[in-house]
Amino acid sequence: MSLRVRLAVVTTAVVAFSVVLASFAIYFSMRADLLRNVDNGLKQRAQSIPGIALGSRPRPGGLVNDLPQSQFGQPEAFQIVTAAGEILHPISGFSASVDSRTRAVASGKGDAFFADTTIRGVHARVLTVRITKKAAVQIATPIDSVDRQLDRLKLILLLVSLAGVVLAAGGGALVSHTTLVAVRRVSDAAERVTSTLDTSERVPEKGRDELAQLAVSFNAMLAALQEAIETQKRFVGDASHELLTPVTSLQTNLEVLAKASKLPAKKRKDLIGDLLGELREMRKLVGNLVELARGKNGERSEKVRFDGLIGDCIDQATFRYPQLNFATKLTPTTVEGDPARLERAVSNLLENAAKWSEPGGVIEADLADGELTVRDHGPGISDADKPHVFERFYRSTAARGMPGSGLGLAIVSEIAEAHGGSIQAEDAEGGGALLRLTLPVVDPGPSA
């Protein structure tokens, strides 16, 4: 059964149940009102009957003559019942069975009550009430008019219920069709995207309800997917271009080295040095590409003494760049994250600063309140380059003659984001560039 059919069936069932329930409520409420009017009339009639002292047997013409005479079929009929259950004199053909409840009323042990009975084929309402210490009177009135009214009400309610069910079925079908139109549009669009791989597909966004929000969310998902695919295409293209340069250089140098017998020893040595340098750059580039492609996969998280990790990175940078000076001010700080990735982010920041520093220059690294600032005294970052310094493969005009692939700061940005932090680039006071890496600080705990 399709969702459309199920929705129509459920809507019809709910409306039908509500109509039937309302019909029952109306019927029994009306019946109670009609019987209440009849009961009030019987009570008033009972109050008009005077109390009569009854003996064991009525005197001829005594008790009977004291009660109003009537034939059943007129407003009321009467019957006298003693506490022993004896009917003293049925009046006007009134004859109803006497039970223990009636005897209890006659003896004063029970309260007056109403009951329905049939007298000579007529549906009647009977009030049993005590009139003396030894007897009760039963007053009956026909309620066939009430039955006729209730029968007409039953027919009306039945017709109304049937009409309600039919209208509910039609309304349910219309509602299900109208409701699922938006869902069907999204489903059709998803099928087209699956078959054509065209992520430019969009669903019309109509209205402000939840179904319209579904279309908005679906379009947002398609937009994000399209952007991811475009980013992947650019990434693959840029990576291919970046890899092509060292591969071409390696091929050229290897072809020259193949003719090593015709080259001087110094020339061969220089070629081998170039080859090793190109291989190192390629290894670094491949490592950066793997880091970017990995994202959060395989990332582990633990409490890390960030100041100690930065100190280790500065020791390595001091060894790699002996011509530079490093000034540090590190406040003890604990963060949560992957130590290997955090170390790579810090190393990339230091390497970027070293690339723009002149021999003998100073690189300043300060850590306080979870914020690491790395400053160099180079030319700084131009206003045109600031919006792009954290983009993959972006290299400023001034950096194109330097080693590197434009991935270092992009990796720092991704690592910072993965750890709930941020990275910013700005001009340093007095010249140079200042990069701010901010990470959430955690309680170091007793084991730190």
Image (cartoon, grey):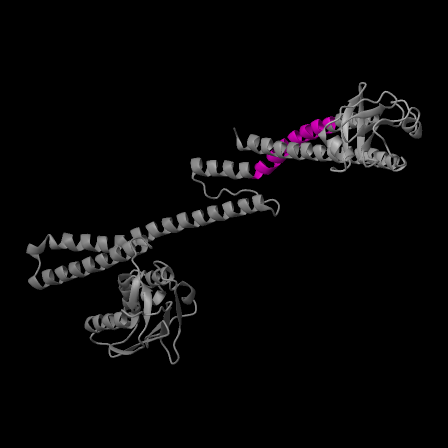
Extreme-bottom residue of the structure: 430
**Does residue 401 appear anywhere in the picture?**
no
The chief SS type of the magenta part is helix
Image quarter for residue 270? bottom left
Residue 414: give x, y in percent of width and height.
36, 60
Nearer-the-camera pick, 290 or 382: 290
Q: Quadrant of the C terminus?
A: bottom left
**Does residue 132 appear anywhere in the picture?**
yes
* Residue 398 placement, left or right of 152: left
In magenta stretch: residue 387: no
Residue found 85% across the figure and 30% down from its top: 55
Extreme-front residue of the structure: 56
What are the residue bounds of the magenta stretch? 158-182
Residue 189: give x, y in percent of width and height.
50, 38
* Residue 275 placement, left or right of 347: left
Residue 169: give x, y in percent of width and height.
64, 29
Residue found 29% across the figure and 73% down from its top: 307
In magenta stretch: residue 180: yes
Residue 340: give x, y in percent of width and height.
26, 62
Extreme-top residue of the structure: 121
Nearer-the-camera pick, 179 or 54: 54
Residue found 90% across the figure and 28% down from its top: 63
* Residue 174 vertical position relative to residue 325 in the rendered view, above or below: above
Total numbered labels: 0
Nearer-the-camera pick, 106 or 27: 106
Image quarter for residue 146? top right
Nearer-the-camera pick, 143 or 310: 143
Image quarter for residue 178? top right
